[in-house]
Amino acid sequence: MTIADPQTDDVEAPQLLGPWALMWRKFRRHRVAYLSLWLVGFIYVLALFGDFFAPEKLDDTNRRGIFAPPQGIHLFAEREDGSRVFQLHAKARKVQVDQATMRRSYVEVPGEIIPLGFFVDGYEYKLLGLIPANTHFFGPKDPDDVVYFFGADRLGRDILSRIIIGTKISMSIGLVGVAISLVIGVSLGGLSGYYGGWIDNLIQRLIEFLRSIPTIPLWMGLAAAIPLGWPPLRTYLVVTIIVSMIGWTSLAREVRGKFLSLRNEDFIVAARLDGLTDWEVIRKHMIPSFSSHIIASLTLAVPLMILAETSLSFLGIGLQPPIVSWGTLLKEAQNIRTIIEAPWLLIAPGTMIVIAVLALNFLGDGLRDAADPHAH
Amino acid sequence: MKVNFKTRSPMMAGVAALCLAVAGALPAWAYEEAPSLAEKVAAGELPPVEERMPEEPMVMETLDSIGVYGGTLRRAILGGGDQHNILRQIGTELLVRWSHDWSEVKPNIAKSWTVSEDATTYTFELRPGMRWSDGEPFTADDIMFWYEIFLDERLTPSKHANFVDAGGPVQVSKLGDYTVEFKFSEPNGLFLQALAYGFGYPPVVYPKHYLSQFHIDHNADIQALIDAEPAATDWVSLFNLKAGPMHTPLFWQNPDRPTLHPWKVQNAYGSTDRVIAERNPYFWKVDEEGNQLPYIDGLAWDQVEDAETILLKAFNGEIDYMARHIGRPVNLAALTDNKDRGQYGFFQVGDIPGSQTALLLNLNNPDPIKNEIVNTFEFRQALSHAVDREEINDLVYLGAGRPVQTAPHPNAPFYNEEWATRYTEFDPDLANELLDGMGLDQRDGDGFRLGPDGNRFTLVFLVADVFGWQYPDVGELLQGYAKDVGLDIQIRASDRSRLQEIASAAEHDAYIWNCPGGLVDAYVNPFCYLPRGGAVYWAPKWAAWGTDPTTGIEPPDHIKELFEIYRGVTSTSDPAAQEAALLELIEKANSQLLTIGLIQSNGAFGIVRNNVRNYVDPMPIAGQLWTPAPYTSQVYFEGGVNLP
C-alpha cells in the first residue's frame, strides 16, 4: 500500500484511489474476512502440495490400525536416567483383539515412543506431479512407524492424510461447476436483461425449458450413457459440467432482474450517452453494482457442492471410493458402527468442511461488503 | 462366530421311493387354542378348534419346550424390495420342508409322498380337512388350479425350472380329493429337494375359491372387477395383481388373499409405516401336546429407511428376533455393547455360501481381446495368486472368515481340502511369471501390462455394497494387489439393481458377488460351478445356451462337459450317483477356476430377545433355503408377553 499517512502535516493532495484499491482497503478492515483469506489460501496450499503435507500414503492399509483412535503429540520425552528432554513424539501403541466381539483396542506401550519431526523422510511422491520427492512436512522420523494424528478408518488408513489429499478434489472440481454456472448465468442473464425484446424472450423460454427437465431421469440417462471404462474422476467432472449447464438458470433469472432494474438508472443512461459500448457499460457499471449478490450466491453454492459430491453415487456417477474427497470421507462415516466405535471418522472431515465453508463464507461476506458501493 | 452344526447328505428320493414319512397317527386329544380365538369361538364368530383343524394336523417336533400363547414379535423392514423379510419369517410353508438342521426332507403340507422307482413320478397325500386362512378347504383342486395357471401362456409366460424338464412342463394330475401326482418325462432325482427349497412354493399359494373370480375362464362377469380396480387394464393384469408371486412385493400387498401361513398380513407392505400380521385361526400345525400353533399372536414390522435404523432399534430392545440386515461381523462389537440395554442375546446363523466374496470375471466379455484373456486359465490363476486373501480377511472381515477358493465348506458332507486351498496361495512372483508367460509381458510407463493390441489391459470390476459384506472395500484392496503385478483393475461402485442390469446383459468385465453352493444346496444351486440359471453372471451367454440352445452363445467343449456332468446329478434318483456326479462337477469347475473365491464365512448371527424360546439355533439359511420359516410358528415368549 502506498497511501500517505493522513496524520502528517505536510500533506500533498490525497491520492485518488481506484475502485479496486478502495475495495482492498475496506476488505482489510474486515478482520474475519481477512483471516479467512489466509485460511482459504492455506487450504489451497494443502490442495496443491497434498503429498508433502500428508504423513502417510493415501491407500496404505494396516492390519494393526483398524479404527485406531487419534494420537496426541507430546513435547517432552523421558530419558532412561529420568531427566526430561524436548522431543516431539507420540506414544507407541499395540493392538489387542477381543475375540468375542472382534473389537480392536489400542493400549500404550509404556516407555516406547515414536519420535516425530519436521521435514522427515516418508513415502515417495511427485511434488506438483513433476518433482520426485520423499520429504514430508511433519511425521514420524522413522518412515516405518505409523502415527495416526486424526485416527484411522476401518481399513487402518490414516485419516489426516486422506483429508489432506481429499482437499484437492473437493476444492477444485466442485468449484468448476460453480464457475460454469456463474459464467453462463451472468452472460445469458445479462444479455436477456440488457437487450430485452426477442433475445429476452428466447432466453427466458430456454430457461423454462431447462427447468422443466426432470433431474432424476436425466441423471439416469447420463449414468447409462457414460462408458463404464471411464475413470471415476472424469465421470464426475463431466457430470458436474453437465449439471451446471442446466443449473445456471436461477442465477440467470436474478441477473436479468438486476439488469432490468439497472438499465434505466440515470448513471447507466449517462454512461451510454457518453458513448460507451454495450460491453463497457455492462462490465464497468452494471456488474460491479450487483457483484455483492453474485459473491453471496457463489459462496453459498460451494458447501452444497461438497455435500453433493456423493449424492449421485447410487447411479455410479457421483464421487465414490477409491477416489478420496471430503464428500466420500463423510459418506463413509455415515453409519452407526462408525459413530459408536470411531467418531473421529465423522468429526475430522466434518470439521474440515465446516472450516472451509465458514472461511469461504466470511471471505465472500468481506468481499461483498468491500465491493458494495452503498455500504458504509 | 463359529457355527457348529454339520449337515449330512440329504436323504434322497431313492430311499423315499418306498414311501415313508408317517406324520403320526395321533392319539385322539383335545386341541387347545389361543385365548383370543377361544373368545371368538364363544362369541360364535369362529367354529370350534376341532372343526378348524385337519383330521391329521402336522405335529411340530418341539425344539426346546412347549410354549404359551401371546405376544407380538417385532421386527423392522426396509421399504421396497425387502419382501423376503416377511416371506422368510412367515411365508415358507411348502408341500415338504427341510428338517431344521437342513439334513432331510420332511412332510409339511403334504402328510406323505411316494416316489416311483425311476424317480419320474411323485405322488403327494394332502391333509383332509385342512383349510385356508379364511376357512375354505384346501384340496387337490387348489393345486390343479395352480397347474392351470402355470400352463397358461397368458399368465405364466416363463416357467420356473423346478417344474420343467427336457420334455416340457411337468404333468400334474389329481388322483383324489387329497392326492396329487407330479410326473416328469425323465428322471428328476432332485425334485423333492427342490420342492423343499423356497421356489417350491407355487403349488400351494393359489386358493382357487378366491383367485378364480379374477380369471376370465372362471368368472364371466370379470369386467366389473376390472373396472373396479384402477391399476388393472385387462383381466391378465388384474389376475397378476391379485395373484402376485410370493417372492415379489405384490404377494404381500394383497391382504385379501387367503394363505396357509401361520400368520396373515393385515395391511399391504409398503403402504404404511408398519406391516401387521395376525394369527391364522385355521393354521394346521400343533405342538406335541395338541396346542394349535402359532403361539405368538402376531408380528409387526416397522418400516424404516435403512439398515442402520434397524441396528438402533435393536439397541433399544425394539427387535425381538431378527438376523436379516444386522447380523454381520462388523456390527458384532456394537451389538455386544448394547446387549444388556436391549435385553437380547445372539443365535447362530449358518449363512455359509460357497464363497462369500468371489471375483466373477465375465467369461462372455463383449470385447474380443478381453474375452480371450479372461478365458485363458493362466490369467485367472495369476489373478487368484495375486490376491492376499489373509489380508482381506483381517482387514475387511476382522478375521471372521476363511481365505479359501470357491468350494464347499468344511461342514458340507463333500468337503475337500484340495478344492478349498487350490490356487489360494498369495504369490505375486508366480502371478507375474504366469502373466509374462501368457504374452502379457509388455508394460507401459506406469508399469501396467499391455494387451495384445498394444493398449493397457484394463478390467473394470463392478461392486455394490450389499449384504453388509463390504465389497467396495474388497475392490479397493484388489485394485492394489492387481497393480502390484501390473494389472490395471478399476473399481466402479454401483447400486445393486444397476449392477444386476449390466451384469445380466453380459456388458460387464467382472464383478464381486457371493457364490452359493457351500453346503448341500450345491445340488440344486451349483451356479458357481456351472453357468446355469439367471442369478450368477460370470457367463450369462453360456447360461442362456444351457437353458435354451437356440439362444446365447454356444460354450466351448470344457463347459459343455460341465452341463453333461450336471445332467448326471439331476437325472438319477440314486444318492450315491448324484453325489459322485456333483463331486466330479465341482472338481472340474474348481480346477478350471471358473470363479475366483476369496473368502468363505463361518456363518453370521442374529439377535433374539432374552425371553424368546423355541427358535432354531444354529439356523441354516441359504439363497434358496428361506428360513426360519417353517419353524417360526412354534416360537414363543416366556410368560406370553414381550419383555418391556
Image (cartoon, coloured by chain):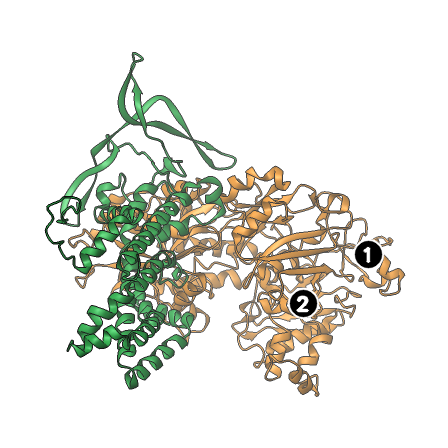
Chain colours: A green, B orange
The residue lying furthest to the front in this view is: A9
Q: Nearer the viewer, residue B501 or A345?
A: A345
Task: Please tell me in which quadrant of the rendered image residue B340 appears.
Answer: top right
Q: Which mark is residue B504?
A: none
Cα–Cα span, label 2 and label 1: 27 Å
Q: Is residue A102 visible?
A: yes
Mark 1 Cα-neighbour bin, 10 Å: few <14, some 14–19, many ≥20:
few
Q: Position of residue B553 (x, y in %)?
A: 36, 71
Q: Which chain is indicated by disc 1?
A: B
The percent coordinates of residue A40 (x first, y second) are 27, 49
Closer to the chain start, of discs 2 and 1, is: 1
Helix, strand or loop for disc 1? helix
In the rendered structure, find residue B36 and report the number of the disc placed on it: 1
Residue B4 location in percent, x, y?
56, 40
Q: Nearer the viewer, residue A80 or B637?
A: A80
| Helix, strand or loop status at disc 2 | helix
Does residue B606 lie above or below A256 as drawn? above
Residue at horizontal 58%, vertical 49%?
B323
The three-letter code of the residue at mark 2 reads Val
Which quarter of the figure is the C terminus of chain A placed in?
bottom left
Q: Which residue is mark 2?
A: B204
Classify B203 as above or below B491: below
Please report the residue visible at 26 percent of the width from the left and 38 percent of the height from the top.
A55
